[in-house]
Image (cartoon, rainbow, N blue to C red):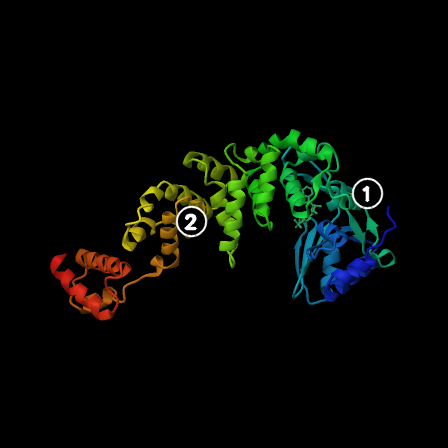
Amino acid sequence: MSEKSLSSQLEEYLPRGMLKLVRDAGEKASELGLELYVVGGVVRDLLLGRANFDLDLVVEGDAVKLAQELAKESQARLTVHPHFGTAKLSYTSFSLDIATARRESYSHPGALPSIKSGSLTDDLCRRDFSINAMALCLAPQRFGELIDLYHGKDDLDNRLIRILHPNSFIDDATRILRGLRYEQRLGFKLEPKTDELLRRDAAMLDTISGDRLRHELELILKEDKPERVLKRAAELGVLTKLHPSLRGNGWLSNRFSHARQACKRTSPSPLYLCLLIYNLSEEENEQFLSRFNFQKRLAQAMRHTLQLKTKLHTLANPQLKPSDIYQLLRSYTTQAIQANVLAAESPVVSQHLQSYLARLRYVKPLLNGEDLKRMGVPQGTQMGAILDALHRAKLNGEVKTREEEERLVHILCYTL
Ligand code: ATP
């Protein structure tokens, strides 16, 4: 075990309240005769000087019992999962996840592992990469001591992503996607043997369930530059394992960066997905949707994207009236329209799509059905037709004021 201590980094990077909690938790564990550790991403990021407050703690012993003891002495809300040996303590501004150290084995590739309680060593050797397999001891006498069984610190220094054993990607092929995500996020490289095994085992992604694959894809799309991960996945023959027709090329990179700019206040992930499938056929998209088991709303946005793509030639006509544009686009989801704005080659098409998003979809006449009733228009098909005609006139700027709308209604009563 390494003698290196990271206590000064813990003190520097963790918010004061969190640091106190972590110290108290280490002390309480010691009182109970248990060893408590910080594990995983926080240790990696602490060594890299990157902020990360998602604290995962592992205890050699009963995590639920330790969490219950800690909860007694604080205002924390306690959630326990005795079956999994995990507990969560939620404080006002952050939370601590505590898990019983565990040993895993895989009945077959891609299966969820079967789990038994184990030692810290067992817990570290089930992890994905050396840089994620380090721990810091929280026992008062050893506070901040780095436990680095797989030389994760050397790999951090040398900017390498390294699996822990040659069967790692076979046991759990989600690690293929995780590895590319860390590689691109941190600007690291796959260590040569890991690179070779990743290419060899890319087909093992077939063993992963749709839900788990989707979760990993969603994590990729949450990265600052997901296009880099997808490009790398394409280079390594991984992207085509998600669907043979997916491409992680320059076109996609360019559209993703525009999508980010277009989504300042919302998550760009749904838009990224609509762009990712943009060059698939509708049939290929259906295969992709069912493989990843996307939820209904997202699936609809992706389907609409491709349906609208087939209508773009109609939108290329510069003579279209605003009411024609409205009519063409009214039934499509916003994300499908946004995706087509970003993907369309024709400036006229983009302009029409954008004018719908920015203005036309919000245009409503001042008069409604109630007003028409008061004006003596009988309810029924005629009223529907008048309201539609009024809406079209409003979209086309033919009526502006309430008086102009009323005048039009009177005329329409005689003509419709
Ligand atoms: P991020 O910064 O992306 O959240 P993280 O390291 O905190 O990174 P999590 O997905 O929260 O990642 O997982 C926590 C830890 O659990 C990882 O650091 C890794 O040690 C381990 N882990 C997660 N997924 C796997 C996996 N599929 N196989 C092995 N170990 C895993």
Q: Amino acid at mark 2?
A: Val
**Is the CB atom of the residue marked by disc 2 within 8 angstroms of ligand 1's nearest atom?**
no
Classify mark 1: helix, strand or loop: loop
State left or right for residue 396 relative to residue 205.
Answer: left
Q: Residues within 10 Å of mark 1 (few under 14, many from 20)?
A: some
Q: Residue 337, can we see it? A: yes
In this view, which residue lies farthest toward the left? 414
Residue at (75, 60) in percent of width and height: 13
| Mark closer to the chain start, 1 or 2 | 1
Residue at (37, 55) in percent of width and height: 355
Q: Which x, y percent locates residue 293? A: 50, 41
State left or right for residue 390 relative to residue 48.
Answer: left
Q: Which residue is mark 2?
A: 341
Closer to us: mark 1 or mark 2?
Answer: 2
Q: Quadrant of residue 183?
A: top right
Q: Residue 84, can we see it? A: no
Q: Quadrant of residue 200?
A: top right
Classify mark 2: helix, strand or loop: helix
Q: Amino acid at mark 1?
A: Leu
Q: Which residue is mark 1?
A: 149
Q: Which x, y percent locates residue 377? A: 16, 64
Q: Residues within 10 Å of mark 2 (few under 14, many from 20)?
A: many
Q: Nearer the viewer, residue 367 or 374?
A: 367
